[in-house]
């Protein structure tokens, strides 16, 4: 499937994040046996020679740790994609962040993206001075205090728990979808008035 719009790109990345959650849960619940990852894997790559991957012998604990890292990496990639989509649809980030839902969303997404971008498997907050404040996003009853987080390892508790981070992603996607649909409608109106 060709992914072209900001919403499609974010959706595709979020689908990868959701898949990583399924993989992590499946391994943790024993529904995906960890020894599956110790078997040889052959990937067909078209007309070229097959790619064969043979992982070294991995313990159950190592596989669970790698699954957790996969979740972190896909979550970080999701925040990078959301940040890029918001920039593409709304323009440059504000010089000064006002106390409103839109600016708060952009600030929180950007700071989270930065934490993951520099170390995806072990994100650390890198809060620039102008972001060291409390941000609120009222439609999802979300609040995060970034004043004391600079240099600390990112933790779901900073968002109020995993569910609030998930809600933040879904809310961002809804905003991007709305702007995406408005842009498509506007583009269609421009095309029809030019004919």
Image: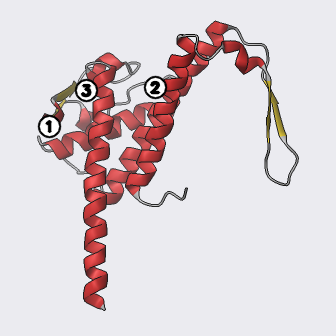
| Residue in the image at 35% along x and 58% along y | 88
Residue beneath disc 3: 146
How far across and down, in percent of the image, does residue 66 sit? 60, 19
- Does 27 sit left or right of 155 as displayed? right
- To which quarter of the image does residue 130 belong? top left
Q: Is residue 62 left or right of residue 15?
A: right
Relative vertical location of residue 132 with respect to residue 110 in this rendering, above or below: above
Which residue corresponds to the image point at 71% horizontal and 19% vertical from the top-left? 36
Q: Secondary structure at mark 1?
A: helix
Q: Position of residue 37 (x, y in %)?
A: 71, 20
Could you say where residue 29 lies in the image, as x and y percent from the top left?
Answer: 53, 11
Q: Nearer the viewer, residue 28 or 74?
A: 28
| Real-space CA distance between mark 2 and mark 3, rounded to the nearest whole angstrom | 15 Å
Q: Nearer the viewer, residue 91 or 126?
A: 91
Label whose residue precedes the other's in the sequence (1 or 2): 2
Q: Secondary structure at mark 2?
A: loop
Q: Secondary structure at mark 3?
A: loop
For the residue carrying disc 1, how many other residues have a C-alpha within 10 Å: few (<14), some (14-19), or many (20+)? few
Q: Which picture quadrant has residue 111?
A: top left
Q: In percent of the image, x 30 and y 56: which residue is there? A: 92
Residue 120 in view of the camera: no
Q: Is residue 4 left or right of residue 67?
A: left
């Amino acid at each position: 499937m060709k992914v072209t719009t900001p919403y499609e790109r974010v959706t595709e990345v979020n689908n990868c994040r959701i898949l990583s959650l399924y993989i992590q849960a499946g391994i943790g619940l024993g529904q995906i046996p960890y020894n599956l990852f110790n078997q040889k894997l052959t990937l067909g790559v078209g007309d070229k020679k097959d790619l064969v991957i043979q992982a070294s012998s991995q313990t159950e604990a190592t596989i669970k740790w790698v699954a957790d890292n996969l979740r972190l990496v896909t979550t970080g990639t999701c925040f990078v994609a959301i940040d890029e989509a918001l920039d593409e649809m709304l323009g440059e980030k504000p010089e000064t962040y006002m106390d409103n839902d839109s600016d708060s969303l952009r600030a929180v997404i950007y700071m989270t993206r930065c934490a993951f971008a520099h170390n995806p498997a072990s994100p650390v907050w890198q809060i620039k001075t102008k972001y060291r404040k409390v941000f609120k996003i009222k439609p999802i009853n979300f609040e995060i205090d970034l004043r004391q987080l600079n240099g600390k390892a990112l933790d779901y508790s900073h968002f109020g728990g995993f569910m609030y981070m998930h809600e933040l992603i879904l809310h961002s996607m809804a905003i991007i979808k709305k702007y995406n649909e408005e842009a498509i409608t506007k583009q269609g109106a421009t095309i029809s008035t030019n004919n």
